[in-house]
Image (tube, rainbow, N blue to C red):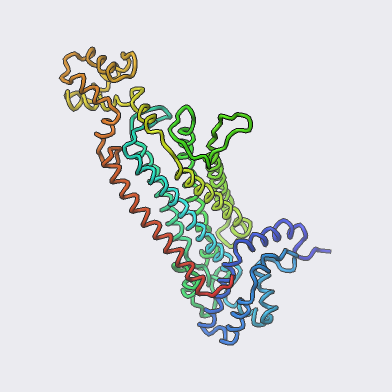
Amino acid sequence: MAERFPAPVYAETVLEPNFEHAKLHFLEALIQIHYAHTLMLAKQGILTPKDMRALLEALGGLHPKRIQAARFDGSCEDLFYFIEAMLEDSCGREIAGKLHTARSRNDIAVTLYRMTARAELLEAARGILELRAAVLDLAGAHLETVMPAHTHTQPAQPTTLGHYLLGACEFLGRDAERMRGAFARMNVCPMGAAALTTTGFPIDREMMAHLLGFDGIAENSYGAIAAIDYITEAAAAAAVAMVNLGKLIQDLLLWSTREFGYLRISDGFVQSSSIMPQKRNPVALEHTRILASRALGQAQAVLTCAHNTPFGDINDSEDDLQPLVTAMFASAGRALRLLAGAMKTAEVDRERMRHRAGREFLTVTELADTLVRREGMSFREAHDVVAKAVEASADDSAEEIAAAIKRLRPHLKMKTAEIVKALDAENFVRVRKVTGGPAPERTAESLKKARAMEREMLAWVEEKSAMIEEARKGLTVRL
């Protein structure tokens, strides 16, 4: 004899876990959709005023705490049918059944997924901007803090800490912009698409979009249900942000080592050892790294689950995928908040950075440039002369290099003092006044622009958050 649906193992492995996740993450959005659909049907004359009032009263009588406390028992397939059963108990099966006119679980599901994910996107953007603000504050305090920059993990040339951090602020800004772009394409409403092909009832899709806080409708009804790029784009934006974050964290951890000693975060973000009393472990940075890696892995999992699936209504894009989306945003949010907190407490050893910037021949590029300007050499000739001087120098002091240059080219017009000045790390930075360079006047300009962008992006986050909250309150949802 064939089993009745659901088979026990299906209920245990699919329906029960998805019911629990939906209660935690989709309940509010589902009830908002019910409110909006009721109002729209009534406005279009599809529901009578009497039936509308009965449905609104039944919706107002739903108790979220009771719903959250419910356990899956197989009597209802999912949260949608569970809520429908509660409405039937409240206003009767006939009136409750009218609520499902001109819609499907398909457009409901995709809509509530978008409603939940758009809020998570805004929080991710907010987290990026909070971290960016902390980095900007640190950059502003260190526009003239000279430090060694590295290429291929080797000391290369002097720059400033402000210049380095403003570079990080640029990618953080792009990360926030990617979230903004993903939000714009996510925040369109699928309601009215029904199963795939809309409906013969004269519904108002634009009204539904407005009531639910969307910026517009997902117009093509097939694509509204079948397309998955609204969430894969968000996953891609999160993945890029976490890769960027990881690169910054790697440097911060290196700078926190005793060997480098550039960076010190406060005791609130540091743990000692159970056996070694001297240890000062920057564990907050390590936790940030693993959280960013987790979020990256979860984002990749979202993309993998969507890959090579049909362009249609399929479960691969639905209940079992959504917990990965939730987990991805949660991990990314934790990483961003934690690093922002640590960066707000960061202290920098300016003198140690400055000292290192003047060592190991890091300034000799400017000496070659100065020979080009003062002596009329080609850069290739100047490069060759300086390379030989470095090779011939007993140590990396400016005086020793100057002496080697004089031995190699005794007829130079440049005085020893000019050569020594060309090898000064602060001078190296000051003369690099090209747009985007480390000269303090250039980084001050960049800082001003970055702060303006920060204000504009935060205003956008607040505007969209307020729009969504206004829509929620406008539906008088009792949650």
Is the residue 131 above or below the residue 271 in the image? Answer: below
Q: How many marks?
A: 0
Instruction: Tell me residue 294's x, y (percent).
Output: 57, 45
Does residue 87 appear left or right of residue 201 in this picture? right
The quarter holding residue 376 reads: top left
Pick the front one: 404 or 194? 404
Is the residue 342 above or below the residue 432 in the image? Answer: below
Pick the front one: 37 or 422? 422
Does residue 178 appear left or right of residue 304 in this picture? left
Residue at coordinates 56% horizontally, 65% vertically from top-left?
A: 112
- Image quadrant where one finds the C terminus: bottom right
Is the residue 233 above or below the residue 74 in the image? Answer: above
Residue at coordinates 36% horizontally, 32% vertically from top-left?
A: 147
- Image quadrant where one finds the N terminus: bottom right
Instruction: Tell me residue 225's x, y (percent).
Output: 55, 64
Is the residue 89 above or below the residue 266 in the image? Answer: below
Look at the image and tell me whether residue 218 can be seen.
no
Look at the image and tell me whether residue 387 can be seen.
yes
Instruction: Tell me residue 282's x, y (percent).
Output: 53, 37
Residue at coordinates 48% horizontally, 28% vertically from top-left?
A: 258
Does residue 2 appear left or right of residue 418 in this picture? right
Instruction: Tell me residue 366's x, y (percent).
Output: 26, 27
